Image (tube, grey):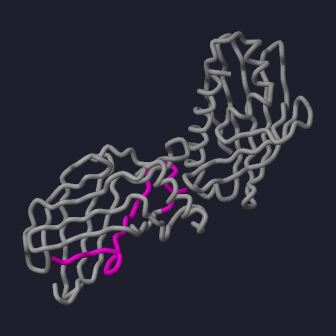
């Protein structure tokens, strides 16, 4: 079994923006700082600490995103969106294919469990994969501001990028 | 220049509605993020509005003045002159109220420059429209 975590990889969430005032908002790159995953030939599991998100960068917007704003967004995610809820993925089926795996399973996000499938690519010791998570499927109302004219896009991208131990 | 029209209901008599609109200490906090900083006279207040855009915000500081009032016709114009504290832009507006029994109408003419205006006039109009709609819901309880 291969164990994954911040020691050998990054788990990144990318958000987009929508609404009439989308220009005022930023596309965010958010890093999950505490997470743990395991990978075998027939199972993928991953858990993440909802209180460990850090905003790495933001693009777009009508003014640059400073450290104070990045911290403010992380605090908003913590207090108004994730609220320290559960984040756990467990595969039900892993199919090997050339260059990687197709993974099917279920994501428990804040207590709501829904199916989620994604592809993992393996190139030598380099593992990458991206899953699209539609927030409303997990009964999360995408965060909005400016009287609802600025919204976080419903679909967020969650990516893993890890270096596999040589013995794997 | 952005021009917008709205109506609102209070369920109160016209005289009450006019009195409420002219009371700057009551009316300014009805704007989301708005607060009175200092009263200069019964008809003039120094005020600020903090417009939150998620974790980011823009603060406009300036004056709100009763530019005109007609107690017989039950109309009033509030003039807002403000500057963006974090930039060189400004947000000025004339907000004309026509009061009636049960509520009234609002005609807003606003000019906004700087960072906020960089979103484009259509976006500014949409956000301002949403802000005034929110204001009208608060007027219902004034």
Q: Nearer the viewer, residue B55 or B3?
A: B55
**Quadrant location, the N terminus of chain B:** top right
Q: Is residue A130 left or right of residue B84?
A: left
Q: Is residue A44 magenta?
A: no
Count of numbered circles on the image? 0
* Residue at (70, 42) in percent of width and height: B110
Task: Give the image quarter of residue B17.
Answer: top right
Q: Position of residue A28 (x, y in %)?
A: 45, 64
Q: Nearer the viewer, residue B24 or A12?
A: A12
Q: Nearer the viewer, residue B12 or B74?
A: B12
Q: Position of residue A27 (x, y in %)?
A: 46, 63
Q: Is residue A4 magenta?
A: yes
Q: Is residue B54 above or below residue B87?
A: above
Q: Is residue B59 above or below residue A123?
A: above
Task: Give the image quarter of residue A126.
Answer: bottom left
Q: Is residue B114 left or right of residue A164?
A: right
* Residue at (76, 24) in percent of width and height: B21
Q: Position of residue B99 (x, y in %)?
A: 71, 17
* Residue at (69, 13) in percent of width and height: B100
Q: Position of residue A7 (x, y in %)?
A: 34, 79
Q: Is residue B26 above or below residue B118?
A: above
Q: Nearer the viewer, residue A54 or A134?
A: A54
Q: Give the magenta-colored segment's residue range.
A: A1-26
* Residue at (67, 19) in percent of width and height: B104
Task: Give the image quarter of residue A4.
Answer: bottom left
């Amino acid at each position: 079994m291969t164990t994954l975590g911040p020691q050998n990889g990054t788990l990144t969430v990318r958000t987009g923006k929508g609404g009439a005032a989308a220009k005022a908002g930023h596309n965010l790159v958010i890093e999950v700082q505490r997470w743990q995953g395991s990978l075998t030939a027939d199972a993928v599991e991953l858990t993440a600490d909802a209180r460990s998100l850090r905003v790495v960068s933001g693009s777009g917007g009508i003014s640059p995103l400073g450290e104070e704003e990045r911290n403010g967004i992380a605090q908003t995610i913590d207090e108004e969106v994730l609220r320290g809820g559960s984040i756990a993925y467990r595969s039900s089926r892993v199919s090997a294919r050339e260059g990687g795996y197709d993974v099917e399973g279920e994501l428990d996000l804040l207590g709501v469990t829904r199916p989620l499938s994604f592809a993992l690519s393996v190139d030598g010791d380099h593992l990458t994969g991206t899953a699209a998570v539609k927030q409303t499927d997990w009964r999360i109302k995408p965060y909005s501001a400016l009287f609802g004219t600025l919204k976080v896009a419903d679909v967020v991208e969650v990516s893993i990028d890890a270096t596999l131990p040589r013995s794997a | 220049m952005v021009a917008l029209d709205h109506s609102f209901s209070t369920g109160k008599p016209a005289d009450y509605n006019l009195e409420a609109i002219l009371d700057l200490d009551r009316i300014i906090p009805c704007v989301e993020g708005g607060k009175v900083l200092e009263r200069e006279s019964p008809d003039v207040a120094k005020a600020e509005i903090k417009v939150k855009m998620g974790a980011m915000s823009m603060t406009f500081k300036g004056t709100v003045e009763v530019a005109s009032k007609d107690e017989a016709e039950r109309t009033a114009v509030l003039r807002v002159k403000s500057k963006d504290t974090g930039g060189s832009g400004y947000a000025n507006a004339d907000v004309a109220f026509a009061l009636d029994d049960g509520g009234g109408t609002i005609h807003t003419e606003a000019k906004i420059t700087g960072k906020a205006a960089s979103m484009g006039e259509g976006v500014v109009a949409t956000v301002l429209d949403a802000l005034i709609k929110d204001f009208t819901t608060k007027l219902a309880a004034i």
